[in-house]
Image: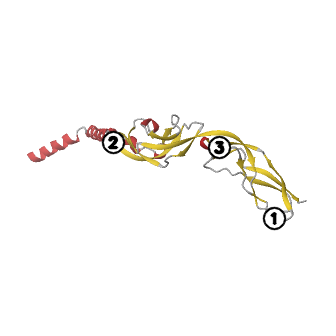
Amino acid sequence: MSIFSGKAAAVRVMLLKNLRLKLISIAFAFALWFFVAGQSPTELGIMVPLGYKGMPKDMVMTSAPFGEVEVRVTGPRFLLNNIEQGKVMVELDLGAAREGLSVVRILPKDINVPMGVKVARVVPSSVEVRLERLADVELPVRVRLSGRPAAGYRVSGVDVRPKKVMARAFARYASDKDAIFTRPVDVNGLANSVDRSVGLDAPENEFVNVSDYNVRVRVTITGER
């Protein structure tokens, strides 16, 4: 055996010695590297739906942006990779909002993110919201007629049920309301009395809701004497 072959054999023995421990050490080193890489802070941008909560009971929102905002979050890479976008949402609390136009800041507390993840910034960082005050009013129902009965006939009576309805209206209109009208009841050419279900004329820009959107109207038609 030559001196070179003897040295090669010695080297081979050294390499094979404790091979299992050496492989475990290499695997552990790789696992540690991946773990450290996964723990290193990184930043991610996600599009998050914008929602609202805590609306005062006597207020209604008449203008506000909806859709999505961009949320930049930081945290370990493995946590950011597992974020489910559908479960992250911005919910702005309007409990302290006032009547009129308000600028509401979007704060980290308004965004639910997984533990270990932090909100770095939001784009936009604020939104404009307009609230209007509401008022509950009781209004008498008045029937609006259109047209004229047939020749020789006239409207001798109009009855409506219910005679009054409860309505929730915008406060700026409520003080000027002394009645709510029906949609026009056409009596043109009629020679007989009619009994109909008629809708109320409650514009959305004035009323939020009405206790009865339809009323019964009876129009009595009689011959002229």
The residue nearer to you, when weighing 82 against 54, is 54
Asked whether residue 1 appears in the rendered view, the answer is no
Which residue is labeled 1 in the image? Answer: 189
Q: Which residue extends farthest left?
A: 3
The residue shown at (16%, 43%) is: 11
Expressed as whole percent of the image width and height from the top left, the position of residue 26 reads 27, 40
Q: Amino acid at mark 2?
A: Thr
Q: CA distance from mark 3 to mark 2?
A: 59 Å
Q: Which dot marks residue 42?
A: 2
Label 3 neighbour load within 10 Å: few <14, some 14-19, many 20+: few
Q: CA distance from mark 3 to mark 1?
A: 35 Å
**Which image quadrant: the C terminus?**
bottom right
Q: Amino acid at mark 1?
A: Gly
Q: Which dot marks residue 176?
A: 3
N-terminal of the two: label 3 or label 2? Answer: 2
The residue shown at (46%, 37%) is: 110
Verify CB contact (< 8 Å) between mark 3 and mark 2.
no
Callout 1: SS: loop
Label 1 neighbour load within 10 Å: few <14, some 14-19, many 20+: few
